[in-house]
């Protein structure tokens, strides 16, 4: 700080210090606001430090004012030059051209879309909901009894080979189908029952054009008095024609499942090749979309349902294969592709 009655030496020392501190403060300013604050401190019209230095000239002896005036002018020149230099530097660092116009509409961005399998499941659920069905869910980690025992799978039966799965230890495994949801529902609610059970299942299947080791499955169950195979076939035919179109050709082939008797596979004419034959339908012209049949009495009894009074039917389908037919996909592995452009294409 400059004394009230400084000597010439004190004045000259203060002028030099002021010029150095001011130039350093201007050079250190990171933006326009910081530079303006430094300008007010050193060059302000009311309380700037240079103004204090100027007023100090009057307190000096007349014979010292010449040298002091020269020091004042040098300090002023140094400060103004440092200020102009930093101001130019900050302006050159700012990008040229028009600034962001916040009034312009934002660019459209595709945020994502539902997976083709999800779209298929939603559509299937909507069709069956009109037929009186509701959705039921269950755990992906199941016990052997719910996954096999309650569904009439005899121990060491060849049918078990079709359901090789991943065991978690202590009788727990990753479910091979969503049929355990059916048993859990039968244990919890009395008939009549009409449910759909969608979810992910796990099997030791090869990863090829029509199989995957982990895939979505959707099963249906209807239990009531007087239900017959005619109800099964008519309901599934209505579904196929609602989903694929009124001219859809279907067929039922005898099959075997431990939990249904009699059992049948349901096929629809391959929409990829029009029934001519391709790799997706293995050259048959038909695409298997689900297995079905009348619920085995042993399954009803295991769930605590009187099999003499109640009958029912069940089906299970892979929405992945349905999606292949719906969107014309030759290989199921496309549904596992992580490229979001695939989802964008389906969403359109």
Image (spheres, helix red, strand yellow):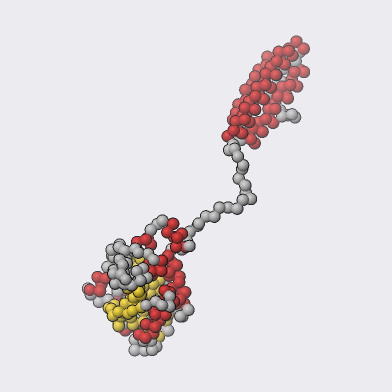
- Nearest the eye: 127 or 205: 127
Q: Is residue 154 left or right of residue 56?
A: left
Check the image and name the residue furthest to the top: 63
Rendered view: 174 above or below 98: below
Between 286 and 80, which is closer to the camera in this rendering? 286
Q: Nearer the viewer, residue 245 or 141?
A: 245
- Horizontal and vertical percent position of residue 249: 37, 77
Q: Residue at x 32, y 71 (%)?
A: 276
**Residue 194 placement (x, y as % from top left):** 42, 80
Above-or-below relation of 95 to 48: below
Residue 198 location, x and y as percent?
A: 40, 71
- Whether residue 294 is visible here, answered yes or no, is yes
Total marks placed: 0
Residue 302 in sight here: no
Picture residue at 70% right of the left edge, 19% below the top = 73
User: In the image, what residue occupies the spot 37% across and 82% down?
Assistant: 233
User: Which quarter of the picture shows residue 267?
Assistant: bottom left
Q: Residue at x 67, y 21 (%)?
A: 77
Would you identify the image quadrant in which residue 256 lies? bottom left
Q: Position of residue 101 (x, y in %)?
A: 62, 47
Left or right, residue 215 beside residue 96: left
């Amino acid at each position: 700080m400059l004394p009230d009655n400084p000597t010439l030496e004190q004045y000259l020392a203060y002028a030099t210090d002021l010029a150095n501190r001011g130039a350093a403060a201007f050079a250190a300013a990171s933006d326009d606001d910081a530079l303006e604050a430094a300008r007010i401190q050193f060059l302000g019209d009311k309380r700037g430090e240079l103004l204090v230095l100027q007023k100090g000239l009057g307190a000096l002896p007349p014979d010292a004012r010449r040298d002091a005036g020269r020091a004042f002018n040098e300090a002023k020149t140094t400060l103004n030059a440092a200020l102009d230099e930093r101001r130019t530097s900050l302006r050159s660092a700012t990008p040229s051209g028009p600034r962001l116009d916040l009034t312009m509409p934002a660019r459209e961005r595709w945020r994502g879309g539902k997976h083709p399998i999800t779209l298929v499941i939603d559509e299937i659920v909507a069709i069956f909901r009109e037929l009186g069905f509701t959705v039921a869910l269950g755990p992906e980690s199941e016990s052997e009894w719910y996954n096999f025992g309650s569904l009439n799978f005899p121990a060491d039966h060849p049918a078990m080979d079709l359901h090789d799965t991943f065991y978690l230890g202590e009788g727990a495994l990753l479910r091979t189908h969503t049929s355990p949801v059916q048993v859990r529902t039968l244990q919890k609610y009395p008939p009549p029952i009409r449910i759909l059970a969608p979810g992910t299942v796990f099997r030791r299947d090869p990863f090829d054009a029509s199989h995957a080791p982990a895939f979505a499955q959707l099963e249906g169950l209807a239990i009531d008095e007087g239900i017959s195979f005619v109800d099964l076939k008519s309901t599934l035919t209505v579904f196929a024609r609602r989903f694929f179109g009124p001219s859809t050709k279907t067929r039922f082939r005898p099959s075997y499942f431990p939990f249904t008797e009699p059992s049948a596979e349901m096929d629809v004419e391959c929409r990829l090749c029009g029934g001519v034959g391709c790799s997706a339908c293995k050259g048959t012209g038909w695409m298997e979309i689900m297995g079905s049949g009348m619920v085995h009495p042993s399954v009803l009894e295991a769930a605590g349902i009187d099999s003499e009074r109640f009958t029912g039917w069940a089906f299970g389908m892979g929405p992945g294969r349905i999606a292949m037919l719906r969107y014309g996909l030759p290989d199921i592995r496309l549904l596992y592709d992580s490229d979001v452009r695939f989802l964008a294409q389906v969403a359109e």
